[in-house]
Amino acid sequence: MGGRVLIDGSERRTFAMRSRVNWGVLGLLIERQGHGYDLFLRFQRTYGSLIEVPHQRPIYKALKALEERGLIEALPADAQPRQEPPQPKPRYRARAEAVPAYREWLIAQVTQERQQLELLALQVGALPPPDALVVVDHYERALLSEREQAPPALDRASVLARELAEHAKQLETGVALTWTTYTRAKLEAAIDAQAAPGASAKAAPAVDRVALR
């Protein structure tokens, strides 16, 4: 999906950016300014395994992309904070255009994220029940493992964001676990029906794919 915003009197594309790293960096700069290495550390603390960045290169690539789109800018030399020893790399800040661009991108993500569990249900429903049950079991174990993991260290500017994220995670996990319980019961019933005496391949009831959604 593409979009355009007016920056310095000219149009530039913004929403065509597909990289979650780019948008993640922009969100961090909307919170507060920073330089490349600082953003790399904050990115890891904030997003953890949700958006994995094993080294600094994607962060600098994101900064370049965001600056080219006019969403961020390097601070002027006289606005750079004094440090000992001096910081050789520029610090960046979000421009006024960054907030509406980031907001619209997030709005576009809402529908996509909502559809993930429904998509999994449809794909699971395409498998024979025994194979589908294996997938559901793995999915449930992953959910339980994630719920038991300790939250990452809080970034000082992201306490509210982390609280909101943790609450969303608990709610989402609860819904997903409810779905796995329901789906397992449906799949086991389908397996039992197929194993019943006199059942044939043609007569075996299919998994209720509508109910699995």
Image (tube, grey):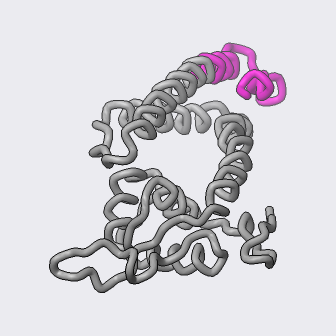
Front residue of 5 and 147: 5
- Quadrant in the picture for the N terminus: bottom right
Instruction: Give the camera-side residue of 52 and 84.
Output: 84
- Residue located at (78% from left, 70% from top): 6
Q: Which residues are magenta?
A: 184-213
Q: Is residue 129 above or below residue 71?
A: above
Q: Is residue 205 visible?
A: yes
Return the residue found at the far left: 84
Give the residue at the far front of this rendering. Answer: 78
Pick the front one: 26 or 210 = 26
Vertical side of 157 occupied by 122: above or below: above
Q: Residue 186 occupies which quadrant of the picture?
A: top right
Q: Is residue 116 left or right of residue 199?
A: left
Please indicate, yes or no, whether residue 200 appears anywhere in the rendered image: no
The quadrant of the rendering that contains the C terminus is: top right
Residue 67 lies, with reference to residue 192, above or below; the image says: below
Q: Is residue 98 left or right of residue 13?
A: left
Residue 78 belongs to magenta span: no
Whole-percent x and y of residue 107?
A: 71, 46
Q: In percent of the image, x 75 and y 19: which residue is there?
A: 199
So how many labels did they put on this image? 0
Q: Position of residue 120 (x, y in %)?
A: 66, 40
Q: Measured from the top left, where is residue 131 in percent x and y?
A: 59, 38
Name the residue rendered at 73%, 49% in the picture.
108
Tell me the chief SS of the magenta region.
loop
Residue 86 falls in image quadrant: bottom left
46 to the left or right of 10:
left
Q: Nearer the viewer, residue 113 or 39?
A: 39
